[in-house]
Image (cartoon, rainbow, N blue to C red):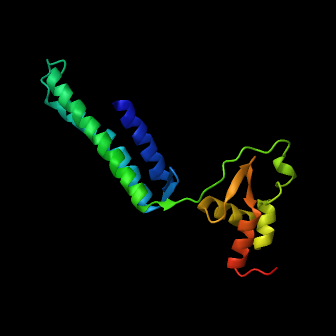
Amino acid sequence: MILWEAALAALGLYVLVTGQLRVMGRAIRGRRAREVGLILIAPLALALILALGLGALLAPGDERLPDDVIDVLSLIEFALVAAAVGAAGYLVFASGQTLGKVWHAKPEPGADPSLGAPQGRMTVAQAAQALELSELEVLALIRTGALPGVRAGLSYHVDRRAVERLRRQRGGHD
């Protein structure tokens, strides 16, 4: 059980430090993400406190706890892990922002991502020019789901119609 607690604590520490978590098409950031991080760290912290407390209560000659006590403690540990995962999952899915769909298409035969996008799609640079945005802003639109895109090497290709639709929404000129 300690491995699960350690894995949750490592994930919790990462979320606590970065302040963001993306899981199963959901994203949370800031304070809510840090709350999830603390919840994920809690089972390991509580198990360590409980172990230290029980160690202090044992008589110096006692080597180990009785088996029935160990069974109850294992059940409590499992309940802590399950409660932490449930609470974190609830926070993520109740308040997390839904990420847009990103295509996961196989590269087309003979298509080299550095040479440009296939017909019906645009490179990030082309989309940035059409939308009068920077490439970083276009990448942010892709990551938030406002602009659907497909991974192409180290960059993305975006749907030409989606770019035109977004351009019209933003009041762009033809």
Q: How many marks?
A: 0
Location of residue 72 in the rendering, given as x and y in whole percent from the top left corner? 18, 31
34 sits to left or right of 110: left
Q: Quadrant of residue 82?
A: top left
Identified at 70% across, 53% down, the residue is: 150
66 sits to left or right of 32: left
Location of residue 174 in the rendering, given as x and y in whole percent from the top left corner? 82, 79
Whether residue 134 is visible here, answered yes or no, is: no
Quadrant (top left/top right/bottom left/bottom right) for the N terminus: top left
Q: Quadrant of residue 137?
A: bottom right
Identified at 55% across, 59% down, the residue is: 99
Q: Is residue 127 above or below residue 17?
A: below
Identified at 77% across, 65% down, the residue is: 127
Q: Quadrant of residue 54?
A: top left
Q: Is residue 128 above or below residue 69?
A: below
Q: Nearer the viewer, residue 23 or 57?
A: 23
Location of residue 113 in the rendering, given as x and y in whole percent from the top left corner? 81, 49
Whether residue 138 is visible here, answered yes or no, is: yes
Identified at 17% across, 21% down, the residue is: 67
Location of residue 4 in the rendering, given as x and y in whole percent from the top left corner? 38, 34
Q: Nearer the viewer, residue 165 or 12?
A: 165
126 sits to left or right of 140: right
